[in-house]
Amino acid sequence: MAVTESVRGDTSDSAGGVAAHEGILRRQSARESAARTYARALPIVPVRARGLTIEGADGSRYLDCLSGAGTLALGHNHPVVLEAIRKVLDSGAPLHVLDLATPVKDAFITELFRTLPPGLADNARVQFCGPAGTDAVEAAFKLVRAATGRTGILAFSGAYHGMTAGALEASGGAYDVRVARLPYPQDYRCPFGVGGEHGAELAARWTETVLDDPKSGVRHPAGMILEPVQGEGGVIPAPDEWMRRMRQITADRSIPLIADEVQTGVGRTGSFWAVEHSGVTPDVMVLSKAIGGSLPLAVIVYRDDLDAWQPGAHAGTFRGNQLAMAAGMATLAYVRENRLAERAADLGTRMLDQLRGLAAEFDCIGDVRGRGLMIGVEVVEPEAESLRERERERERSAGLAREGGVLGDPDWRGGVGDLAVPGDSAGPGRPHGAGVGVGGLVGPGSARGPGPAPRTPGGWPTGVIPADRAARAAAAAMQGGQDHHPRPAAPELAVAIQRECLRRGLIVELGGRHSSVVRLLPPLTISDEQATAVLDRLADAVAAVSRNHPGHDRLQRPQPGQQRRADRAQSADRADRAGRGDRADRADEAG
């Protein structure tokens, strides 16, 4: 086994530390509720932490790529955060002030407004909420309902906005709710089976149809809420053009656009705020996690013309958390002054490239995606014939394109009809491959005349788009081996990978629709050396699961780089056993 099963720190009484560790976990299990989550997958007892590194009560040391679910933009106990907290404590300032004005609060708001997207900062208002992102989501809903006089909310499949009632209604797993659910574009599991720009276009057209069709069953809503990158939904970045379309669609219909930046904000995705990638300025921004510098804090920032609610319309006892405001101000300033968003963009791109190389080695990795230092690796069921099947799929798609009729016409007008999707199961009255989508089918020939639609030799209706355009669309959909009939998610394999990561001293989170996406949320201060250590440990964990899985020969594709990585990992093992520590810890201490 490479790297190390349990990365040990120096302890004077390791047996006592292990006993304390086990006792605390045993008491937690006996006393705390069945609703606890992270503690089940990560049976550790942190006692010390700095930067990327956590040390447990038993002396084990870990590289933390959970970072408080993205809360720790600067990692654990960063010096500027500790200094800001100590300054408030030493000053004798009140720690609890409800919503009264204080110098600490004034400094926080000034720094926050300095970072806001252009077009919002100059005419913004801020509301301090209860100290959790879900309460800020509730506040955003109250705000837009008060401002518009309407009640409905538009949200997206796969979303996660919190655990309180209204936030849950807008989240992807909710049922029997008053929220209209819309498709969120993605490549790997595209709801329309095509992915790419065409899939995003279909998602945008669906949204327009729902809003403009008087028989859609959706009333004119009070607002639309979206995540620029769906985090808990599986680390799915929204295409920039789709984001711009959502902004245009909502602006044209006087629907306030709410951007949930609870996890994506403060440099995480490679821009200070994730909406800045697309140039979109939302009407409302929901902010929490990193803005408190590791302490509880949540706010909404919004256009001043929406400020229509009455005094006390949204209140909370702990919205005056002075320590969180001080820590948050220090964090915001440090990220801005040290250009950590740009650093996240650069390092994230390199990490994604390396992870895609790992995906080429192991058939159980279906997709690698993300933005900046918000990264996801989707784990899927292995398939012995997967490579040959993909090649056959491409050949079938090319054949269909030559016959005519592959993808739906993005220039349709009107209601929802049929979308030809290669490989979809046939439905009643449809040729094989027809699925739910837009009105026109593509194919060679002239525009459709009266009477039954003419069909190609393959049984497809002719349409209005030339065959060469259809072929290009099919090729674009399949380029780079992108699989639009992805294999089933493999949550059990993902859990096994998470467990093997922990044994090697790496903490990762699972997310996605089926909890099958391994998520990396390292602090923005992570060094290149630490990033390499993280990827090596993750790769070694995937290799270990591959070796131990009954279908080992199906999970792994031999690659030259595997032996080099194994040699590096074995060398790290020897260094640990010799007491030299692991390289990530040394780099952290040097920082």
Image (tube, grey):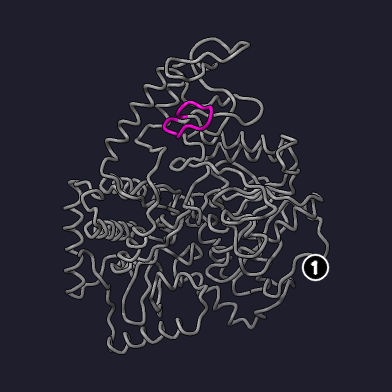
Which amino acid type corresponds to the residue marked 1 in the rendered image?
Gly
* Residue 429 magenta-highlighted: yes
The extreme front residue here reads 428
- Left or right of 523 in this view: 539: left
Residue at 31% x, 58% y is: 538
- Residue 570 x, y percent position in the rendering: 17, 63
- Residue segment shown in magenta: 422-433
Specify the quadrant that holds the N terminus.
Answer: bottom left
Task: Reply above or below: 387 against 512.
Answer: above
- Residue 541 x, y percent position in the rendering: 28, 60
Q: Residues within 10 Å of mark 1 (few under 14, many from 20)?
A: few
- Left or right of 547 in this view: 110: right
> From this viewpoint, is residue 437 visible?
yes
Residue at 61% x, 44% y is: 182
Q: Name the element at disc 1.
A: loop
Front residue of 403/526: it is 403
Specify the quadrant that holds the C terminus.
Answer: bottom left
Task: Reply above or below: 25 against 541.
Answer: below
* Residue 421 magenta-highlighted: no
- Residue 505 x, y percent position in the rendering: 31, 68
Number of numbered discs present?
A: 1
Residue of label 1: 312
Q: Quadrant of residue 95?
A: bottom right
Front residue of 447/59: it is 447
Front residue of 468/137: it is 468
Task: Reply above or below: 543 against 63.
Answer: above
Task: Reply above or below: 11 against 410.
Answer: below
